[in-house]
Image (cartoon, rainbow, N blue to C red):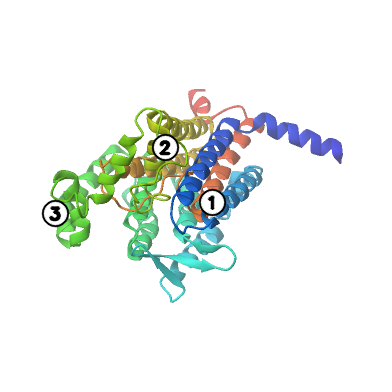
Amino acid sequence: MFKKFKAGFFTYIRHTDWLLILSCMAASGYGIALVYSVVKNTPGAGSRDYIVQIAACIIGIIAAIAISKIDYEIICRLWPVLSGFSIFLVLLTFTPLGLEVADDKAWLSVPVIGTFQPSELMKITFIISFAAHLSKVQERMNELKVVSLLCIHGAIPVMLIFLQGDDGTALVFLCIFASMMFIAGLRPIYFILASTAGAAAVPVAWQRMGVDKQARFLSLIFVEKYALNYGWQQQMALIAIGSGRLWGIGYLQGGNNYLYARNNDLIFTVAGEEFGFIGSLALLAVIALIVLALLREVMSARDLQGMLLCGGVMAMIGFQSVINLGMNLRVLPVIGITLPFFSKGGSSIATLFLGIGVALSVYYSSKSRSRDSIFSKRAG
């Protein structure tokens, strides 16, 4: 028994992606430090935020390692159960059990855990179900009927999250959907048609958009006009980031501008203010390292399904990071997107590690079972 366990342990050590694991742990550790700073510099704030963050990271890492030992083909075969469960939780938010936070009724109250955002779990289950769907139809990928059914599959989570009022998360789902379609080999003509239709729909969408949401876009152009209302948050965010200069004003020394959501959507401002340009650069480097590690897993996957799983997780983290950083730097409007691994949120951190666990399963399987990736097979 001991020899079998020892052999299995060293096999796992040898074949797992330590670059990805250590990068995610570094990002989480940095995030905990930033959340702790916000708590210490916010009058009346309790210690629950960073305690939940630490617990979610520990549970998430353990879950990721456990999931990585499960064959990803088995995980994909369970997509009906996983998707059904996550959709059920999202539907509960439309009942009296749903909680409204920051104008989005996208939360549930869970005993002991506290608040939970089901859409975070749905991101992972969507990646799994869509990877299974795409790999099943790969030979007929570009047939109009198949593309239509794939679009319906992608529209289900987008519409559910949109109805919750969480436009930012709905956008992330769209990015994941488009990225996985690209990886699967969808012809460029479909992307061109979709982009054209999207551009044509902009005037209609603008007219239907509320005044508040329109102002978020206009504040990016007419900075001075909106500086004291809709653009105030981003103006203060830039001031906080700029005040850090090269090395920052010092850990636990920030927070004098009382920015709303400093521990969440605007967590990057804490890094910029307290650790300066160097600390901000370190944050960006860790995120880039995670994305590059996932890209390596995409390239080393032994089949399309594995590529899609890793690519979906990579798209989720990559696009979400770009959108969040764009918000902090006043390049994009504020739409309520957290920075992966850094922003406060137990459900966000824990489910992120579930996705990392799925990607690790692909990598472990490709290394321990077959040395050939899908690219080397095609070359042969």
In this rendered view, identify the residue nearer to me: 65 or 324.
324
Residue under label 3: 203
The disc label shown at residue 274, or none: 2
Residue 132 in the image: state x and y as whole percent.
50, 49
Give the class, few, some or many, for how many residues have Cα within 10 Å of label 1's Cα (few <14, many ≥20).
many
Query: In the image, is 295 to the left or to the right of 62?
Result: left
Residue under label 1: 50
Give the class, few, some or many, for how many residues have Cα within 10 Å of label 2's Cα (few <14, many ≥20).
many
Asked if the residue under mark 2 is in contact with the one under mark 1, i.e. CB atoms within 8 Å, the reply is no
Residue at the limit of the structure toward the top, as seen here: 380
Tell me which amino acid carries mark 2: Glu
Residue 119 appears in view: yes
Tell me which amino acid carries mark 3: Pro
In this rendered view, identify the residue nearer to me: 57 or 91.
57
Q: Earlier in the sequence, mark 1 or mark 2?
A: 1
Q: Earlier in the sequence, mark 3 or mark 2?
A: 3
Asked if the residue under mark 2 is in contact with the one under mark 3, i.e. CB atoms within 8 Å, the reply is no
Residue 351 in the image: state x and y as whole percent.
52, 51
